[in-house]
């Protein structure tokens, strides 16, 4: 399994499609001298959707392409023809990807099932054509709306491997060697600390009876819970596992201290990890030093957890270890991971608008009022009058009067500047 391109974090920008504009049009048929309004609505903009793809195992592509956009809706046309909807943009990500809003840090989705989808940016609504504004008292409205802008945001993607069993331990404890002898994975192996700089996955089959996914994860060091070394990158992958194999380098005189240190790092990062079922593999029993340390280690460690003396290099004890792990997995529940879409778009509970002054300009800010101004076709008197009635009903004009606005002052709302005449 080649993982040299493994990337487990990325930041991307997504932009949904803008809605198409509505249109002002009237029936112009030969024998209909007073044709009514026939302007169609604009089409809605396309959504940006993330989809979990089991064929992917890295976020590398998002370091090469960071901007993604859906299609905009087509404008409405005469004869009450609605514009076409913009195309959706589907972005495929690995199963196990957690999606965050980069600005707020909120979790938007946890994509743990193949094919699972979540909408991360909604397309804007299409503007209404003038056919939608006809009433019994206003039968020829010169009113239409512009399309609504699509949602846009920066996202942070974080990949957490979906492995049943994780190998933990100090650098150079022999985790990569163990993975290589029990599965078809081919991790990079060398005799120096921090050999594993990226996770490796392998499928382990025991006596054609048990099968599970085993992950060799980067070695831990003191301070990993605070992000030292590869700390956070390592620990996020541990969160998904159901069982941990704690590989100890039995040849080291500090082997028991290493065991305590690793578990303390797990506890400091997430107390639940310290409670995760754990099996100890006392490795390098082919070396005289490990053989000398084994009796004392067995006496102390066996009081806490099941311990297996092994040699990943020679295969000693490895089959017994894997068989025990396979049996234990049958008794363990799947990890509690939220499945399904996480609601991304919530009701906006912020005030409708706010008024502030910048020199001689009065600035009105607020999502609803800015959308109203952006969607209004100010070139049509009917449309401008309707927008002013809506602003009056929202309390915008009263707020400006209370703030002390004077005739001739400039009012800025979004990208539009208006002159105050009252």
Image (spheres, rainbow, N blue to C red):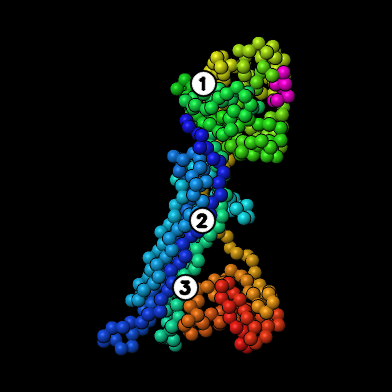
Instruction: Point out residue 4 in the picture as x, y percentages from the top left corner.
Output: 51, 34
Residue receiving disc 2: 14
Disc 2 + disc 1, Cβ < 8 Å:
no
- Mark 3: give few (<14), some (14-19) or many (20+) Cα within 10 Å: many
Decide: is 392 above or below 177: below
Q: Residues within 10 Å of mark 1 (few under 14, many from 20)?
A: some
Label 3 SS: loop
- Residue at x 71%, y 35% (from the top left corner): 223
Can you give x and y, in whole percent of width and height, for residue 34 in the image? 33, 88
Going by the image, does 139 lie left or right of 224?
left
Dot 3 or dot 2: first in sequence order is 2
Per the image, label 1 sits on a secondary structure element best described as helix
Find residue 212 and report its horizontal and vertical position in percent. 50, 29
Label disc, if present, on residue 395 of the rendered structure: none
Q: Which mark is residue 146?
A: 3
Q: Mark 1 sits on what residue? A: 181
């Amino acid at each position: 399994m080649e993982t040299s391109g493994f990337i487990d974090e990325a930041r991307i920008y997504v932009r949904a499609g803008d809605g198409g504009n509505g249109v002002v049009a009237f029936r112009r048929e030969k024998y209909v001298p007073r044709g009514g309004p026939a302007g169609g609505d604009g089409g809605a903009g396309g959504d940006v959707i993330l989809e979990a793809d089991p064929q992917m195992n890295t976020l590398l592509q998002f370091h090469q392409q960071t901007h993604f956009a859906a299609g905009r809706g087509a404008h409405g046309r005469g004869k009450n023809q609605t514009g076409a909807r913009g195309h959706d943009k589907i972005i495929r990500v690995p199963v196990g990807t957690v999606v965050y809003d980069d600005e707020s840090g909120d979790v938007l989705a946890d994509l743990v099932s193949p094919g699972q989808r979540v909408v991360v940016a909604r397309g804007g609504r299409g503007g209404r054509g003038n056919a939608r504004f006809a009433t019994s008292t206003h039968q020829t409205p010169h009113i239409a709306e512009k399309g609504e802008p699509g949602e846009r945001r920066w996202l942070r993607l974080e990949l957490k491997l979906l492995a049943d069993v994780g190998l933990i331990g100090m650098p150079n404890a022999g985790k990569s060697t163990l993975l290589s002898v029990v599965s078809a994975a081919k991790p990079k192996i060398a005799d120096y600390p921090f050999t594993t700089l990226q996770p490796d996955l392998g499928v382990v089959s025991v006596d054609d009876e048990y099968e599970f996914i085993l992950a060799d994860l980067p070695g831990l060091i003191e301070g990993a819970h605070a992000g030292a070394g590869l700390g956070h990158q390592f620990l996020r992958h541990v969160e998904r596992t159901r069982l941990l194999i704690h590989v100890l380098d039995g040849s080291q005189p500090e082997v028991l201290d290493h065991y305590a240190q690793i578990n303390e790092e797990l506890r400091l990062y997430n107390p639940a990890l310290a409670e995760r079922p754990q099996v100890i593999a006392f490795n390098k029993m082919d070396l005289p030093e490990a053989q000398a340390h084994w009796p004392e280690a067995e006496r102390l460690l066996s009081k806490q957890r099941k311990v297996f003396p092994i040699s990943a290099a020679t295969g000693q004890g490895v089959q017994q270890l894997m068989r025990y792990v396979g049996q234990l997995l049958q008794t363990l529940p799947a990890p509690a991971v939220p499945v399904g879409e996480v609601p991304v778009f919530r009701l906006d509970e912020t005030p409708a608008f706010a008024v502030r002054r910048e020199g001689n300009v009065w600035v009105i800010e607020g999502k609803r009022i800015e959308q109203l101004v952006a969607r209004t076709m100010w070139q049509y008197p009917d449309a401008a009058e309707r927008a002013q009635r809506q602003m009056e009903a929202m309390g915008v004009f009263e707020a400006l009067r209370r703030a002390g606005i004077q005739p001739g002052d400039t009012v800025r709302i979004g990208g539009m500047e208006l002159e105050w005449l009252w």
